[in-house]
Image (spheres, helix red, strand yellow):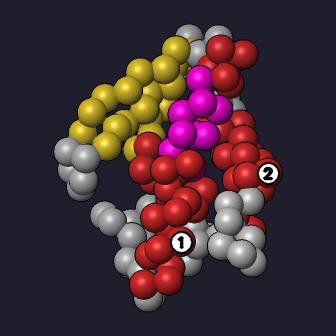
Amino acid sequence: MTPKFENIIEYEKAQLLLQPIYIRLIDNIRKQSELLEWSVEYQEISEPFPGYLISLKKNDYLKKYNLWDLCFQICFTAYQQGQIEPVEADKMLINDRGELNWEALENKTKNLVIKLFAIN
């Protein structure tokens, strides 16, 4: 399900954020998988919109995630998969001049990726 936006400003913020988030997410997954010796596989999907499922595997543990849902969790405040309410871009990721806050983006991405690899 694609996110719904309250207004064009929120949509434009997402447009600014999603590509850098996607790139940082892929890079952080790669780094963490190498560090912890997990295997990572990507499977192309077309529904609900084109993207990838990511499978993380180590020994008997297998976790699968939709890459766009992970990006949305970073991009938006309190995003939940399948959310019906309009999304709001995380204000910490964009400064007052409308520029990316790279440090906040990297920190939020790293924190999410660490949780992905947690064995529980």
Is 38 situated left or right of 85 in this image? Answer: right
Q: Amino acid at mark 2?
A: Glu
Residue 66 forms part of the magenta stretch: no
Q: Secondary structure at mark 1?
A: helix
The quadrant in which residue 59 appears is top right
Is 104 situated left or right of 77 in this image? Answer: right
On the image, the x and y values in percent for residue 93 come to: 69, 64
Is 39 situated left or right of 68 in this image? Answer: right
Q: Disc 1 designates what residue?
A: 13
In this view of the protein, which residue sits in the foreground, 56 or 45?
A: 45
Give the CA separation, mark 2 to mark 1: 17 Å
- Compared with 64, 9 (above or below) is below
Q: Give neighbour class at mark 2: few <14, some 14-19, many 20+ (Cα, 10 Å).
A: few
- Which residue: 72% across, 46% down? 106
- Compared with 16, 62 (above or below) is above
- Which residue: 73% across, 52% down? 102
Q: Disc 2 designates what residue?
A: 103
In this view of the protein, which residue sits in the foreground, 105 or 84?
A: 105
The quadrant in which residue 43 appears is top left
* Circle on res. 92: none
In this view of the protein, which residue sits in the foreground, 22 or 69?
A: 22
On the image, the x and y values in percent for residue 79 come to: 54, 67
Magenta stretch, residue numbers:
21-30
- Which residue: 62% across, 20% down? 33
